[in-house]
C-alpha cells in the first residue's frame, strides 16, 4: 500500500512537507483510542530471537529509528508502535534553533538517498523535556545531543552537559553527536582533545547519579581509518559505552544523480544507499579493534534486509534505519524483523540438524566400539576354547603315554 498509494502522495510533496505530514498523522493516530495498538498489530514483530540486551538495556528487537526523524520526541510512542525496537530522538540542543533556510532537505531517488542541511533544527531542551516526561509505552528512547550553532567550539561542552543533565532521568541512553553540521568542521569535532572536553563533564556528572545512562559517540563516515582508530582508542581508554557509526557524509562519490542536480542542491549531509559500504566497513573495524567487547549501533545505508544482515555480521549489536523508512515505508521494519526471525529459525534448524548428526555420529561410533568389543571378546573366547581343546588333547596324550 505504501509503495503504490502513500509514497506517491508523500513524494509529490517536498521532503520536509512530507516529513511534517507524517509526524502529524502519527500524532493523530496516537490521540485515537486504540490507534497505537492498531499500528502495532499491523507492523510489529515479536519473537524471542529478536530480543537483545545491550549496554544494560533490554531491546525487543535490534532495529531502531535513527536520529533526524523525531527531532523533539513528539511521536516516540507511535514510532515504537510501528515496530521499532528503539527510537533515537534529536538532535536536541539547549536552545531552540530554526536551522538553515528552506529548502534544506532533498531526495535523490536514483540513488535512494537524501541530502540534509537542516542545521540541527529543533525546538530545544524545554520541548524535549516536556515530551519525554510523558509516558512512552515502554519504548526505548535514545537522545541524540549536540550544541547550538551559535555556541563556539570552546563552549560546546557546556551545551552537551546541559542537555545531558536535564534529560538524564528520562532517556535510556545518549548519543553524543560529534558531527556539528555547519556549526564547526569535522577536523575540529573529531579531534581527541575536543572529544574528551565534551565527554569528561558527562562522565563526571554520571558518577554522582543513582541511575546509569549509557553514553555513545556518533561519528562521521568521512573519517579515514587512522581517525577511526583514534576514536576506538578513546572507547578503550574511557568510560564511554559504545559508538554509533555513522551519520551522513559530505562526499558525493559514485552517485547516479547528475552533477548539475547536485550543484543545484548544494551542501548538506548525504544519507541512504551510498553510505552502505563505508558504514559497514567502519563498524567492522571498530568491532575487530575493540575485540567485540563494546556495543556498536550501526547506521547508514540500511536499505534492504541483506544490508541489515551484513551490518550485524560486521559486529553491530543494534541497527538504525532512516532513509530506508523514507523510501520503503513502515512495512520495511516488519520486513527486516521478519527476515531476522527467519534467519534465527533457519539457524536453529541447522543447529538442531548438526546436533542430530553429531548424536548419530557418536551413537554410530559407540555402536562400532561395542561391536568391536564384542568381536574382540568372541575372538578371546574362541582362542580360549582353542587353548582349552589343545590342553585337553595334551593331557589325554600324556595319560596314554603313562599307561
Image (spheres, grey):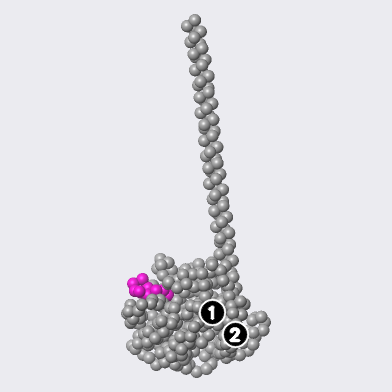
Q: Is residue 359 magenta?
A: no
Measured from the top left, where is residue 398 in percent x and y? 48, 10
Magenta stretch: give its range. Answer: 234-243
Dot label at residue 80: 1
| Residue tagged 2 | 33
Q: Is residue 238 magenta?
A: yes
Residue 210 appears left or right of 284: left
Residue, x 34% and y 74% (percent of image)? 238
Measured from the top left, where is residue 63 in percent x and y? 52, 74
Discs 1/2, front: 2
Q: Is residue 111 visible?
A: no
Measured from the top left, where is residue 5 in percent x and y? 67, 84
- Cα distance, mark 1 to mark 2? 16 Å
Foreground pick, 315 / 25 = 25
- The N terminus: image quadrant: bottom right
Q: Is residue 370 above or below residue 213?
A: above
Question: Badge 1: how crowded within 10 Å, few (<14), some, or many (20+)?
Answer: many
Amino acid at each position: 500500500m505504501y509503495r503504490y498509494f502513500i509514497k506517491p502522495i508523500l513524494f509529490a510533496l517536498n521532503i520536509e512537507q512530507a516529513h511534517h505530514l507524517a509526524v502529524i498523522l502519527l500524532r493523530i493516530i496516537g490521540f485515537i483510542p486504540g490507534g497505537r495498538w492498531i499500528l502495532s498489530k499491523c507492523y510489529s514483530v515479536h519473537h524471542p530471537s529478536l530480543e537483545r540486551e545491550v549496554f544494560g538495556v533490554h531491546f525487543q528487537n535490534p532495529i531502531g529509528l535513527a536520529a533526524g526523524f523525531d527531532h523533539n520526541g513528539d511521536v516516540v510512542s507511535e514510532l515504537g508502535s510501528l515496530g521499532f525496537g528503539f527510537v533515537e530522538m534529536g538532535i536536541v540542543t539547549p536552545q531552540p534553533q530554526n536551522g538553515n533556510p528552506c529548502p534544506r532537505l532533498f531526495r535523490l531517488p536514483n540513488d535512494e538517498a537524501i541530502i540534509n542541511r537542516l542545521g540541527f533544527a529543533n525546538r530545544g531542551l524545554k520541548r524535549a523535556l516536556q515530551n519525554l516526561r510523558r509516558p512512552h509505552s515502554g519504548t526505548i528512547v535514545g537522545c541524540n545531543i549536540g550544541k547550538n550553532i551559535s555556541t563556539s567550539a570552546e563552549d560546546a561542552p557546556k551545551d552537551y552537559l546541559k542537555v545531558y543533565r536535564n534529560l538524564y532521568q528520562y532517556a535510556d541512553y545518549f548519543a553524543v553527536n560529534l558531527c556539528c553540521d555547519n556549526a564547526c568542521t569535522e577536523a575540529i569535532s573529531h579531534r581527541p582533545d575536543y572529544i574528551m572536553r565534551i565527554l569528561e563533564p558527562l562522565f563526571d556528572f554520571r558518577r554522582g547519579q543513582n541511575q546509569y545512562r549509557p553514553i555513545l559517540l556518533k561519528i562521521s563516515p568521512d573519517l579515514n581509518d587512522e581517525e577511526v582508530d583514534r576514536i576506538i582508542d578513546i572507547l578503550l581508554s574511557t568510560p564511554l559505552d559504545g559508538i554509533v557509526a555513522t551519520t551522513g557524509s559530505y562526499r558525493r562519490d559514485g552517485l547516479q544523480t547528475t552533477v548539475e542536480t547536485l550543484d543545484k542542491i548544494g551542501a548538506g549531509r548525504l544519507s541512504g544507499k551510498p553510505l552502505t559500504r563505508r558504514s559497514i566497513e567502519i563498524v567492522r573495524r571498530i568491532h575487530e579493534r575493540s575485540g567485540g567487547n563494546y556495543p556498536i549501533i550501526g547506521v547508514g545505508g540500511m536499505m534492504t534486509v541483506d544490508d541489515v544482515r551484513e551490518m550485524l555480521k560486521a559486529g553491530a549489536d543494534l541497527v538504525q534505519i532512516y532513509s530506508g523508512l523514507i523510501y520503503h515505508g513502515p512495512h520495511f521494519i516488519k520486513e527486516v524483523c521478519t527476515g531476522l526471525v527467519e534467519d534465527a529459525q533457519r539457524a536453529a534448524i541447522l543447529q538442531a540438524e548438526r546436533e542430530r548428526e553429531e548424536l548419530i555420529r557418536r551413537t554410530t561410533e559407540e555402536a562400532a566400539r561395542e561391536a568391536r568389543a564384542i568381536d574382540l571378546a568372541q575372538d578371546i573366547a574362541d582362542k580360549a576354547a582353542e587353548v582349552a581343546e589343545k590342553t585337553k588333547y595334551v593331557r589325554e596324550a600324556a595319560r596314554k603315554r603313562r599307561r
